[in-house]
Image (tube, helix red, strand yellow):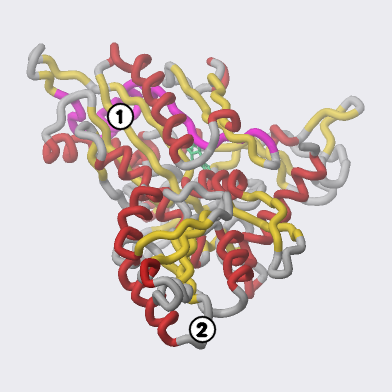
Amino acid sequence: MNKASDNQRMEKIVSLCKRRGFIFQSSEIYGGLNGVWDYGPLGVELKRNLKNYWWRVMVHERNDIVGMDGSILMNRAVWKASGHEDTFTDPMIDCRSCKSRLRADQVFEKRGGKQCPICGSKDLTDPRAFNLMFKTHVGATEDEASITYLRPETAQAIFVQFKNVLEVSRKKLPFGIAQIGKAFRNEINPRNFTFRSREFEQMELEYFCRPEQGMELLEYWKEERLKFYGNIGIPRSKLHVLNVPDEERAFYSKGTYDIEYDFPFGRQELEGVAYRTDYDLSQHQKESGKSLEYFDEETKQNFIPHVVEPSAGVDRTVLALICEAYSEDQAPDEKGNMETRIVLRFHPRIAPIKCAVFPLLKNKEPLVAKAKEIVDLLRLHMYIFYDESGAIGRRYRRQDEIGTPFAITVDFETLGEKNPTLRDTVTLRDRDSMKQERVKMSELTQLLLTRIA
Ligand code: GAP
């Protein structure tokens, strides 16, 4: 696709997200707040499905990983020890003409000097370090002693609770601690919709191991994470693995892969998989004075474990899922004329609504009663949407546009009026193929559960 059509595609996606209740601008009625977003009724379902699936494959389906849920506010000492207070910065340049604050890597040389990409001026400051953490005060007094930060990553809570979790879970190396939660970064230039936000969620795993296992586990987790994206409907052909070169890696990392996705606005990072060695635990042991060592029963030795960290962004993955799902095709309208159909082709596993239920006519009480019976049956197992208004074709279109993979219609056959052998059967329509099959009501739950698993 060319740049213009990619831009157009992104505009359509942003507009659909608002129109159908996936993502809204935060504080919209007050003009918004740059880099902050709210998820509407469908967005929150999509996000939950993603997080639940991550948790399922990372924690529930394995014996070697346990979860935790750390606080957003932590002792400032954590951020000093981790290096965030001194080094979690972006170099930044100010334009003296238009007063824009720009990331240094977005200011390029033109005709013999750096030029502001907004106004073209060359009257720019030298790059200065800008800390990305949001500072706050704990308690009533706003002084140096009460300073802390909103966490810029969830990982540090895992490191500082390493010993507690190890003791209660009685795990042996290699084992991991998983966490999903909010993170905050005062990004200089939030952009590309939710891609670079100031408040976002991360899904992070810290997988602790012996030093000699680090490089092998880095490869293992890269492959596991690529499989994960495939299982939620992001094809391998749209994912790219960047082996981060030595000079761009954190000094303590022995290897880092960025998993990137082809967004309409370009190839961008979805997740980092980093071998962080023993840096974090060593730092916290040194600064807290508390042992964070692991006792090896076999060798009777104490040592600080190494760690491999797959760290994914919830919001970026949600955006990738929406971008990947968005499609337009041609389908017949009520009168058989072809029209453009907007479809979100979500994998059924992560689709916000799994199945819609329609009575063919809303003024036929037996049809409505049967449809509501089906809703009651299915809603114990999955998120269902009931709709009785408008022509059936319109109702299908509305569900296609929000990515509902299945739709059930209760018609006169269901009531057995024409053919008693069809009593208590319904039509089950597939969003992508638009094909319909006749299914017994008694088999619906199992059939749908298999298809959305
Ligand atoms: N603990 C390691 C860590 O935080 P990171 O590469 O800075 O590493 C991990 O962040 C992931 O968090 C990124 O790959 C991305 O998906 C997400 N992320 C980071 N900054 C973000 C932002 N400003 N907006 C949305 N997601 C972000």
Q: Quick one: 73 or 3, which is closer to the camera?
A: 3
The residue identified by callout 2 is 362
On the picture, is 238 further left or further right than 126? left
Q: Residues within 10 Å of mark 1 (few under 14, many from 20)?
A: many
Mark drawn on residue 411: none
Which residue is at 75% across, 60% downward? 339
Q: Amino acid at mark 1?
A: Tyr
50 magenta-colored = no
On the picture, is 275 further left or further right than 22? left
Which residue is at 14% across, 38% downward? 169
Q: Amino acid at mark 2?
A: Lys
Question: Which callout, 2 or 1, points to the residue nearer the camera?
Answer: 2
Q: Position of residue 284 (x, y in %)?
A: 29, 32
Q: Secondary structure at mark 1?
A: strand
Q: Is mark 1 within 8 Å of ligand 1?
A: no
Q: Position of residue 73 (x, y in %)?
A: 36, 53
Specify which label sits upstream in the sequence, 2 or 1: 1
Highlighted magenta segment, given as a residue range: 266-294
Q: Position of residue 40 (x, y in %)?
A: 52, 66
- Spatial CA distance of label 2 from label 1 is 54 Å
Q: Quick one: 193 or 130, which is closer to the camera?
A: 193
Q: Residues within 10 Å of mark 2 (few under 14, many from 20)?
A: some
The residue identified by callout 1 is 207
Asked whether disc 2 touches disc 1, contact meaning CB atoms under 8 Å apart, the reply is no
Q: Is residue 172 above or below residue 115?
A: above
Where residue 444 sits, quadrant-wise, is bottom left
Residue 285 can be seen in this image: yes
